[in-house]
């Protein structure tokens, strides 16, 4: 045995290189890699489809229905909220929401009415919007004594998770 630790390690590595796999071990590894290749081959089209569903915008109503069906199936598969399939389901949900926000025609409302309705729906008080504007300014916006600034529109959009276009008259 060699006393120098560095030399001992080098000798142990050399011993590992000299050992060859037994023919049975080689056969098992070959079969394992063959099965892994088959599994990956079968998984590739599904991964491509999931990538398309989660990354690319929806263009038609039929696509919405198709993706909603896949999203429901994924959610049924999930064992918990942290399950990896929920990542894909949530991403598909985001694409559906984007499509609906862009495609659905909402009746045009005054920005003050939009703000008032969103505040009511979300049970938000004027003071809750302090990061966007102080309560006295919010009051003036709601009473149409003041027009919304671009920064306020962006702030309300971010706060309520709606497109900025909802606040543009």
Image (cartoon, rainbow, N blue to C red):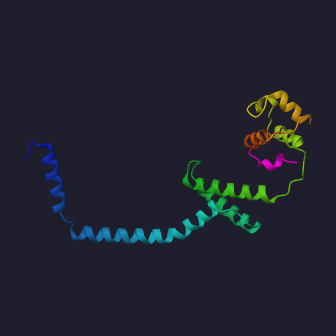
Q: Which picture quadrant has residue 145? A: top right
Query: At 77% across and 55% down in the image, what residue appears?
Result: 101
Horizontally, is 9 left or right of 75 in the view?
left
Compare residues 101 and 1 and report the one nearer the observer: 101
Q: Position of residue 15 (x, y in %)?
A: 15, 57
Q: Is residue 42 left or right of residue 169?
A: left
Q: Is residue 26 above or below residue 147?
A: below
Q: Quadrant of residue 158?
A: top right
Question: In the visual, does 129 lie left or right of 28?
Answer: right
- The boundaries of the magenta stretch are 161-169
Residue at 44% x, 72% y: name it.
38
| Residue 148 colored in magenta in the image | no
Residue 90 sits above or below residue 129 on the image:
below
Where residue 91 sits in the image (x, y, percent)? Answer: 63, 55
In this rendering, the answer to whether 94 lies above or below 116 is below
Q: In the depicted view, which residue is nearer to us: 38 or 129?
A: 129
Residue lying at 14% horizontally and 43% vertically, measured from the top left: 5
What is the count of numbered marks?
Answer: 0
Q: Is residue 158 above or below residue 130?
A: below
In-front residue for pair 110/55: 110
Residue at left offset 36%, top offset 69%: 33
Is 166 magenta? The answer is yes
Q: Position of residue 10 (x, y in %)?
A: 16, 51
* Residue lying at the far left of the rendered structure: 1
- Residue 100 position within the rendered picture, expressed as x and y whole percent measured from the top left: 77, 57
């Amino acid at each position: 045995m060699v006393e120098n630790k560095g030399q001992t390690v080098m000798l142990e590595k050399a011993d590992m290189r000299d050992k060859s796999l037994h023919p049975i071990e080689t056969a098992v590894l070959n079969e394992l890699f063959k099965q892994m290749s088959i599994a990956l081959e079968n998984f590739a089209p599904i991964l491509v489809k999931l990538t398309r569903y989660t990354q690319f915008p929806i263009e038609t109503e039929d696509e919405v229905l198709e993706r909603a069906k896949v999203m429901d199936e994924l959610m049924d598969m999930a064992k918990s909220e942290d399950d990896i399939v929920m990542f894909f389901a949530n991403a598909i949900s985001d694409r559906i929401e984007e499509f609906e926000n862009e495609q659905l025609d909402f009746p045009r409302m005054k920005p003050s009415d939009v703000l008032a309705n969103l505040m009511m729906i979300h049970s938000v008080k004027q003071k809750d919007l302090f990061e966007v504007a102080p309560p006295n300014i919010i009051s003036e916006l709601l009473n149409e004594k003041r027009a919304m600034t671009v920064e306020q529109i962006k702030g309300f959009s971010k706060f309520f998770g709606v497109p900025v276009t909802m606040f543009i008259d």
